[in-house]
Amino acid sequence: MRTTDVFPSRFIKAGDIGDNEIVVTVSKVEIEDVGDDRKAVVYFVGKEKGLVCNRTNWDRIALAAGTDETDEWPGVKVQLYTEPVTFNGKTAPAIRVSGEEAVSLAGARPPPDAARHLARGEYGRHHSVLKLRPPGCSRTPGGLLHQEEQDDSIQQRQAAEGDWP
């Protein structure tokens, strides 16, 4: 028996995603009690758990949606993955949203000033760095994956894994 079996969380954790890259569609955004704070939680179509949204992921979803107005986020497709981050001197995996790929997946347009910020390697006034990839390619642990391979890989993973891996 694992800790997550005894103490299940109502929010997506990095361990739920592991080394996978999961394409999801935003269904709604709610403000909820998380610990002692009230935070934005993003929910996805067909998934029970929500993503507690930090500023980095908020900015990336806003870029994908073309707006920071959460009422317009439902229907936007984004890709969730994990990467190591350091916080309070400890490094651990964290969930990240692939905002730059989500723009092409959702068919949405970025805000008018996004091109200028992206060209400088930044987005918005908080300068969240986005790494651009060639069109039609995806980040994988082994390198870039072309669109056809990405579509097959995503469909196979999602069919095999059900809700979360």
Image (cartoon, grey):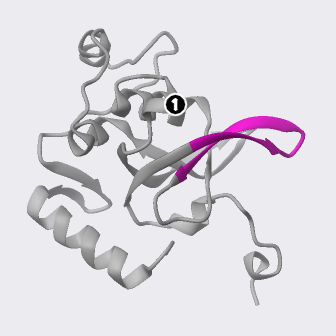
Identify residue for label 1: 70
In the rendered structure, the answer to whether residue 87 lies left or right of residue 111 reads right
- Helix, strand or loop at label 1? It is helix
Q: Quadrant of residue 76?
A: top left
Q: How many marks?
A: 1
In the rendered structure, the answer to whether residue 53 lies left or right of residue 160 reads right
Residue visible at 44% across and 14% down? Answer: 124
Q: Position of residue 152 (x, y in %)?
A: 17, 71
Query: Is 131 or 160 nearer to us in this picture?
Result: 160
> Can you say whether 2 is above or below 117 in the image?
below
Q: Position of residue 85 (x, y in %)?
A: 58, 44
Residue visible at 47% across and 66% down? Answer: 46
> Can you say whether 118 is above or below 98 in the image?
above
Q: Quadrant of residue 74?
A: top left
In the rendered structure, the answer to whether residue 140 lies left or right of residue 62 reads left
Prevailing secondary structure of the magenta residues: strand
Q: Residue furthest bottom?
A: 1
Q: Please tell me whether residue 42 belongs to the stretch shown in magenta.
A: yes
> Can residue 130 be spotted in the picture?
no
Q: Position of residue 147 (x, y in %)?
A: 12, 56
Q: Position of residue 45 (x, y in %)?
A: 46, 59
Identified by mark 1, the residue type is: Thr
Residue visible at 29% across and 19% down? Answer: 118
Quarter holding the N terminus? bottom right
Residue range corresponding to the magenta coloring: 29-43
